[in-house]
Amino acid sequence: MTSVAFDPAVPARRQKRRPPASPPAPAPRPWIVRFALAVAAVGLVLSAWVGLRSGTQPGTAGSLATVIGNEAGMVGMYLALLMVLLISRIPAIERVLGQDGLLRWHRRLAPWPISLLVAHAIFIVIGYGQASHSGALHETVVMVLDFPNVLAATVALALMVGIGVVSIRAIRSRLRRETWWVVHLYMYLALALSFAHVILLGPSFVGRPAIQAIWSALWIATAGTVLGYRVVLPVVRSLRHDLRVVEVKPAGTDAVSVVVKGRRLDRLPASGGQFMAWRFLAPGMWWQAHPYSLSARPRPPFVRLTVKQVGDHSRAVAGLRPGTRVFVEGPYGACTAHALTRPKALLVAGGIGVTALRSLLEDLPKESVPVVVVRASHEAQLYLREELTELVRQRKGQLHELVGSREDVVLDAALFKSLVRDLHRRDAYVCGPPEFVRAVSAALEEAGVPRAALHAEEYAW
């Protein structure tokens, strides 16, 4: 295939005219996250207070169980709202916490709303059963069949529990990403099914139009945020830039680089180290977006990604035809030059994780004198090797290529201390598979790198 007019991979000294890079992503503003946390905490307290105002008369049959059930339902639904907001990819929040951080908090939070909503169902049934002196089992049948919207809420709860079970790491790791993604979409359906039940039957809402209006506005705003940042913004941005594949070429024995061309890419703020969710409008691929790192800083009118062929989608990327339209979400990621807290940097990559660090190198200041450590099981997995070597040379840094099995090449604290004499003066960036990132991060902390100077991104879903 004939090479395109400009390839981000070609060093500047081999080009007659090198287009300037697109503007970097805005700097993160940590105060926004602190403010958001404060607002979320206030909302949690108010939700708990509203839940206690159930209208149930103390001392009556089933009153205690009903109050507990109502409180669990209010707090559980509010935490479910926060859980959705965490994955709505609000740019100002994502730039601080990064996608890894948001997913980590999402996974930590997820068991609580599901558990509380299960408790809500159990205690409400017990309370109503005690009040009617009919027993919990009989009351369950009556509520599901006769109460408005309770059947829909029961289906919603079953969906939530099922999604929670599927999200357990031991189960999730056995599923194809595509399967897990489709299953997870049902959470939105579950929340929609439960909304009417809460507003119409919740003791805290019945006869209280002001609270109904506030709760409805809160959930409408949440839905609008998700649609805005996950659907509307990506569609508008993709149509504006009119991205299309212009070239697919090998980047190793099991990886390819995809060069995409677009218009007005000088208005696409992207920093080295970030990634985008790419949706290729090709048969069998159009319905899902996958995250792949920018393997070079965008240089209008081109942007490039490099993909290792490990799954159905990534293998299909190698067969993309020039002219294929591309829709994108992002850029995302907090592993950028904005995160630097020290004058110098250490970059550690495992396998295809080198793509993010390769683009990050372009943004690092010349005085960062980067030390780059690349770990691979085989020499063929040293992706973008020539480009990495050139970028390190330009910044007067050092490149260490560690090739071998995990038993032969152990990335421990002693190794990093021997490779990087001034480790205490450097920020550390780590990219790669989850196990690699966690092991290397632990080793670097043991070697003396504080958490504030450690920036990591896991290549996983």
Image (cartoon, grey):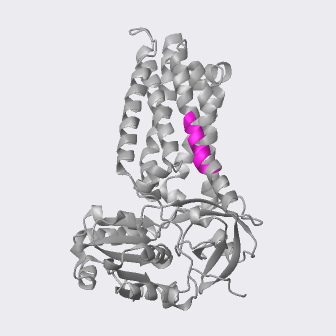
Q: How many marks?
A: 0
Residue at position x 53%, y 65% in the image: 275
Specify the quadrant that holds the N terminus. bottom right
Residue 303 in the image, given as x and y percentages of width and height: 60, 72
**Was residue 229 drawn as part of the magenta stretch in this picture?**
yes
Residue at position x 38%, y 9% in the image: 59
* Residue 133 visible: no
Specify the segment rendered in magenta. Answer: 221-231
451 and 176: which is toward the camera? 451
Using the image, determine if residue 337 lies above or below residue 197.
below
143 and 160: which is toward the camera? 160
Q: Quadrant of residue 4?
A: bottom right
Magenta region, mostly helix, strand or loop?
helix
Residue 425 in the image, given as x and y percentages of width and height: 23, 73
352 and 345: which is toward the camera? 345
**Was residue 392 drawn as part of the magenta stretch in this picture?**
no
Residue 218 in the image, given as x and y percentages of width and height: 53, 31
Residue at position x 48%, y 72% in the image: 356
Please give left or right for residue 66 compared with residue 311 in the image.
Answer: left
Please give left or right for residue 173 compared with residue 65 in the image.
Answer: right
Residue 54 in the image, given as x and y percentages of width and height: 46, 16
Please give left or right for residue 190 compared with residue 32 in the image.
Answer: right
Q: Looking at this view, name the residue that lies furthest to the right.
A: 283
410 and 31: which is toward the camera? 31
* Residue 128 visible: yes
Using the image, determine if residue 359 lies above or below residue 457.
below
Q: Looking at this view, name the residue that lies furthest to the front.
A: 17
Please give left or right for residue 289 compared with residue 367 in the image.
Answer: right
